Amino acid sequence: RLLAAGLPVIHLNAHQHLHVLPGLFEIVLALAQEHRIPWVRIPAEPAAALPFTPRAAQIALLNALGRRARSRLPAGGPATPERTIGVLTAGHLTVETLDRSLAQAGPLSELVCHPGLGQEDLARAYDWGYAWEAETAALCDPRMP
């Protein structure tokens, strides 16, 4: 729809990072090439950010899928961030977790976050438990660069 409306699409990813699943990533690459989309997210949460938790196991699997996807990138593009930060704390970003994540960011990193206001309908519809307003506050905190 964006392309049909004449709006530029410069970044391609999918909800819950589904675009890095085998079979889907190849489609994403073809779409990026066909529509000249210069960036594709490949999840790569820094390993040092992973305490031993069930969520860390999910992130480890996501990182493995990201490494597989990265190995299939054609020469010359699309470009990808070296790291993604904030995946581990998705929906629960605080000033403290943002500060830790930024300390582990590389020269080219993508921050994954979910800021928002007044998302009561979404909170009732989905069990994610995201704290949209708290993430907004963390991102707008004057202590952040």
Image (cartoon, grey):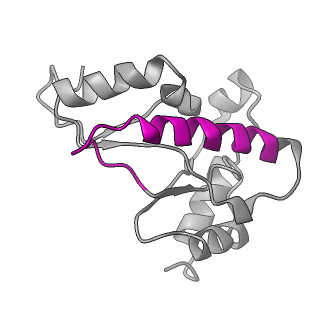
Residue at point 63%, 40% (across, down): 64
Identify the image quadrant of residue 128.
top right
Q: Is residue 131 left or right of residue 82?
A: right
Is 73 or 24 nearer to us in this picture?
Answer: 73
Q: Relative to residue 24, is residue 118 depicted above or below?
A: below
Identify the image quadrant of residue 70.
top left
Identify the image quadrant of residue 45.
bottom right
Estimate the x, y position of residue 58 in percent, counting from the top left.
75, 38
Is 67 or 1 nearer to us in this picture?
Answer: 67
Residue at point 77%, 28% (across, down): 127
* Magenta-drawn segment: 56-81
Residue reaching furthest right? 53
Q: Is residue 111 left or right of residue 108?
A: right
Residue reaching furthest left? 6
Q: Relative to residue 138, is residue 80 depicted above or below?
A: above
Q: Is residue 10 left or right of residue 119?
A: left
The mark total stands at 0
Whether residue 60 is in magenta: the answer is: yes
